Amino acid sequence: MQIITNANQFVSDRRSVVTIGKFDGIHRGHQELIKKMVSLAAEMNAVSVVFVINTSPQQLLSKEERRQMLAGMGVDVLLETMLDGAMITTKAEDFITGTLVGSLHAAGVVVGEDYHFGYERQGNVGMLQDKGREYDFKVFVLKYVSDGERISSSMIRERLAKGLVEEVNGLLGYDFYVTGEIIHGRQLGRTIGIPTANLITDQSKLLPPYGVYYTRSVISGNTCCGITNIGTKPTVDGQFTGVETYFFDCGEELYGEDLRVSLLHFARPETRFADIEALKAQIDRDKTDARAYFGLAEDPAARRHGFFKHSSGKHH
C-alpha cells in the first residue's frame, strides 16, 4: 500500500475509486465502505484510495495500526491529511473539482449516507451525485447501523471512556487493542512472582480508563490470555502511562518482541494500595477471576504445553 502524507502532492495516473472520512477506529461501518471501494476498484480496473482526514490528535487506532489494517484490507493508496486551515476553508465544489476529479481522477466515490464535506460542511451526498453526473464519476452511498442504531466513532469513543469494552468491540467488529514493543520495566513483578510484559503505546492512541482488563495477546503469531493494567501503576511508580500484561502459562523472555494486546473485559479501576503485599494479594485475585473468565484451569503447570497456551475458553 502506498502511503501519502501530503494529499496535495498526490496525482493518480489512473482512475480511482475513493472513500473519504476520518476513519477513527475503522469500525464496522467504515469496513463496509472500504470493502465496497476495494471491490468496485477491482471491477473498474481502478486504484482504490482511502482519503483520511485527521481531526483529533488521539484516535481509536494509532496511525500505524490504521495503516496496517488498511493494508490488510487490500487498499492501494492511503492519503493522510490533517484538517488544517486550508482544508477547512476549501469550498465543497472546489474539493470535488480539484481533488476528486483533478488529482484522483475519480471513477467512483463511496461514502456514508450522512457524509458532509467542504467549507461549513456545505457539501453532501446530493451534491456529490449531481457533480458525479457532470464529471463522470459514480457515487455509492452506504448506511450502517447496529441493532437499529447508527454506528459512529463518537459513539464508540463514549463507550470506551466508560470502560464498556464488550460494547466497543461489538461496534468495532474486532477487539479493541493496543500495540507496541515490549520494553524493560522496573521488574518489580518478577520479584513478587508476577512477571509482566511492559509496553508504551503510541501517543496517537486513545486509551480506555485506567484499570485492569482481561486480555488476549498475540506475539509472533502465538496467542496467550492474561490480565493487563493500563495506567500509571500508582502503588509502585505513577510516573508514566503504560500497558503492563501478565500472561497465563508463558515463561519466556519477551523483550524486544512486538505485542498486540486485545481488551475483552474491564475488571476494575486502577487503585493505589497501601503496600506491595496488598497489591500482590489483589493481583492474585485478579488472576483467579480472569482464569475463570477464560475457562482456564487454576493450576498453570497442568495446562502448560510449550511457549503459549491457546485459550479453549468462552472467548475466541
Image: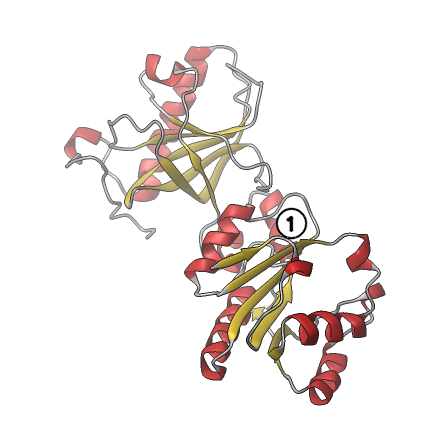
Looking at the rendering, which quadrant does residue 307 occupy?
Answer: top left
Measuring from the top left, give residue 237's x and y in whole percent. 53, 15
Q: Is residue 215 left or right of residue 127?
A: left
Image point (59%, 70%), residue name: 12
Measuring from the top left, give residue 77's x and y in whole percent. 53, 63
Q: Where does label 1 land, which residue? A: 158
Q: Is residue 106 left or right of residue 115?
A: left
Image point (54%, 37%), residue name: 202
Coloured how?
secondary structure
Measuring from the top left, give residue 225's x and y in whole percent. 32, 39
**Total numbered labels:** 1
Between 117 and 86, the one nearer to me in the picture? 86
Image point (52%, 54%), residue name: 167
Residue furthest front as drawn: 13
Residue 303 vertical placement versus 139 (above, below): above
Q: In this view, does 251 lie to the left or right of 44?
A: left
Near mark 1 (Cα within 10 A), the count class, few <14, some 14-19 or many ≥20, is few
Image point (52%, 32%), residue name: 211
Between 238 and 162, the one nearer to me in the picture? 238
Measuring from the top left, give residue 278's x and y in whole percent. 44, 14
- Kind of element beneath mark 1: helix
Between 165 and 200, the one nearer to me in the picture? 200
Looking at the rendering, which quadrant does residue 24 occupy?
Answer: bottom right
Residue 255 vertical placement versus 112 (above, below): above
Q: Which amino acid does label 1 sit on?
A: Glu
Q: Can residue 274 be seen in this view?
A: yes
